[in-house]
Image (cartoon, rainbow, N blue to C red):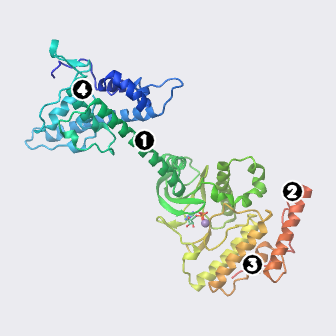
């Protein structure tokens, strides 16, 4: 080492050192203040105090820590290299696996390495470096760090420290001398490029949040895996307008009494609100949520959808209706058992071709489930169709019940009628001769006996019933317990 043994100079990555060494003080203060004030702020020391909290220096700190980590990693590599090579005549090198290449570093010691490791035969002249105190030599041979040649070469070497995406050309390998001015201009460009790409990246994050999950949701999912509740999240099963559904392998439960199913479905309710606007009518008038609705912010309303789905699934589970079993609910993320096997979700009824026998079996099963749902769970599915019924294990499973309401919901009967129309059309088209028409099905499920023989009159009667209920709410402050029916409905069976 030309300037004596390094005394206490441990590997330094303090930004203060970087800056003082890097540029002439006057130039630096002047130009840097204008160009990147956050760097100057960080130069005051890695610890930010008081009100001058500038998060851009967090990035610097992170990078410094990363650098330190990389150095340790490289040191480990060197040890491994040594161990493997031993005294062998033929040696292998891990050079390509190193994170920090010697010339990446800003410390004086490493710059000496830089000369030695490059072995560049075309280099006219070894760029010498200056020690931390800023000068070498004695008397009139003194060379300071402000020396044009030294400084220029150092600047060239430092270009390598610019963001990796920033193309600095192939000047690095040459004996190129960059003036401080040119270097600063380049550096400023590199910084703004970096910021620009960060902005672009951020934009991308936000746009994917609509298709996949936003960072907050991702954190929730990570936590589920971290806690061991889920083993792995394997991928996305479905991307709908209002939710994204993922498949996961179940892990272990923290509590003994709850068993996590081997395969789970994670339904993430989308936090982008537009899609939910048209769903207001389902929840706004649902008396169970009525008091809460007006007080809630949009984010909480989304959570309420998830909560609703959970409660509804639990009711169905208790009635013995085949449906996903609730595992857990965290904010707008609902984890339930997976209907399907080995990551393959059970097909929707609309996608599966059933034998006529299975078709008939499915029909009677659904008729039964609709009755159970109405009477035992006091629910109307409100989005029942071949899209929300899965065929698994030789039977139909009901899913997607976040919008389900109680029959006395102001539009509960209309929703039921729509469900009946979907079901009866599907099975009539599917060749089930026994399938009731939508009006018969409605009466069979609800136990009401609306006699109208055409759709218009039928719907008018439904609306009249709903109005009676509304009036009752107005006058008595509470809803009807059930709609009056003339005795027990007929039982339909195979
Ligand atoms: P959306 O409101 O987006 O329609 P769904 O609850 O219907 O939400 O889920 C969308 C799709 O994800 C379903 O059509 C089904 O294919 C799949 N899916 C949802 N839940 C499960 C589950 N528990 N098991 C298997 N697949 C599921
Ligand atoms: Mn659905």
Kindly identify which residue carries mark 3. 441
The mark found on residue 195 in the picture is: 1
Q: Position of residue 235 (x, y in %)?
A: 47, 59
Which residue lies under the disc numbered 4? Answer: 108
Measure how far apart labels 1 and 2 are at the Cα level.
Answer: 59 Å
Label 4's element?
helix
* Residue at the extreme right of the image, as rendered: 475
Q: Nearer the viewer, residue 92 or 201?
A: 201
Q: Residue at x 22, y 26 (%)?
A: 148
Identify the mark nearer the N-term, 2 or 3.
Answer: 3
4 or 1: tag closer to the N-terminus: 4
State the residue at coordinates (42%, 23%).
44
- For the point 18% across and 39% down, the residue is 174
Mark carried by residue 222: none
> CB atoms at circles 2 and 4 under 8 Å apart?
no
Give the x, y percent position of residue 250. Answer: 50, 55
- Percent x, y of residue 310: 65, 56
Observer-side mark, 4 or 1, equals: 1
Q: Could you give the CA–CA distance between mark 3 and mark 1, rounded to whole angstroms?
A: 62 Å
Disc 3 is placed on an element classified as helix
Q: Residues within 10 Å of mark 3 (few under 14, many from 20)?
A: many
Closest to the camera, between mark 3 and mark 4, is: 4
């Amino acid at each position: 080492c030309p300037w004596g043994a390094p005394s206490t100079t441990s590997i330094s990555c303090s930004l203060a050192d970087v800056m003082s060494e890097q540029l002439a003080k006057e130039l630096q203060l002047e130009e840097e203040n204008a160009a990147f004030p956050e760097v100057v702020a960080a130069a005051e020391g890695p610890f930010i105090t008081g009100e001058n909290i500038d998060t851009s220096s967090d990035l610097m700190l992170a990078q410094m820590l990363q650098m330190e980590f990389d150095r340790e990693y490289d040191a480990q590599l060197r040890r491994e290299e040594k161990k493997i090579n031993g005294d062998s005549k033929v040696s292998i090198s891990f050079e390509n696996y190193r994170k920090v290449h010697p010339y990446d570093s800003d410390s004086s010691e490493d710059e000496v390495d830089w000369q030695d490791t490059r072995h560049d035969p075309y280099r006219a002249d070894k760029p010498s470096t200056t020690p931390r105190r800023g000068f070498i030599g004695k008397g009139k041979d003194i060379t300071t760090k402000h020396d044009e040649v030294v400084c220029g070469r150092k600047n060239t070497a430092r270009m390598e420290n610019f963001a990796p995406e920033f193309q600095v050309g192939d000047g690095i390998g040459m004996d190129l001398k960059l003036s401080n001015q040119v270097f600063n201009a380049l550096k400023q460009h590199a910084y703004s490029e970096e910021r620009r790409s960060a902005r672009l990246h951020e934009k991308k994050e936000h746009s994917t949040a609509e298709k996949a999950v936003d960072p907050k949701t991702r954190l929730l999912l990570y936590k589920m895996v971290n806690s061991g509740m889920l083993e792995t999240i394997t991928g996305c099963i479905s991307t709908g307008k209002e939710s994204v559904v993922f498949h996961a392998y179940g892990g272990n439960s923290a509590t003994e009494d709850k068993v996590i199913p081997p395969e789970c479905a994670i339904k993430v309710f989308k936090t982008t609100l537009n899609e939910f606007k048209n769903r207001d009518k389902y929840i706004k008038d649902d008396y169970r949520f009525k008091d809460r609705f007006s007080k809630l912010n949009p984010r909480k309303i989304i959570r309420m959808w998830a909560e609703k789905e959970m409660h509804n699934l639990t009711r169905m589970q208790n009635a013995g209706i085949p449906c996903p079993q609730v595992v857990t609910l965290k904010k707008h993320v609902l984890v339930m058992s997976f209907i399907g096997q080995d990551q393959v979700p059970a097909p929707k009824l609309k996608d599966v071709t059933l034998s006529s026998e299975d078709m008939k079996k499915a029909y009677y099963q659904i008729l039964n489930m609709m009755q159970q749902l109405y009477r035992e769970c006091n629910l109307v599915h409100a989005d029942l169709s071949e899209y929300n019924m899965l065929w698994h294990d030789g039977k139909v499973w009901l899913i997607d019940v976040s919008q389900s309401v109680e029959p006395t919901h102001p539009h509960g009967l209309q929703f039921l009628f729509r469900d009946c129309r979907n079901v009866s059309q599907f099975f009539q088209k599917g060749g089930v001769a026994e399938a009731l028409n939508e009006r018969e099905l409605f009466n069979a499920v609800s136990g009401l006996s609306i006699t109208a023989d055409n759709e218009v009159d039928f719907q008018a009667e439904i609306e009249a019933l709903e109005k009676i209920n509304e009036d009752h709410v107005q006058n008595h402050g509470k809803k009807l317990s059930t709609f009056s029916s003339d005795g027990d409905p007929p039982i339909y069976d195979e």
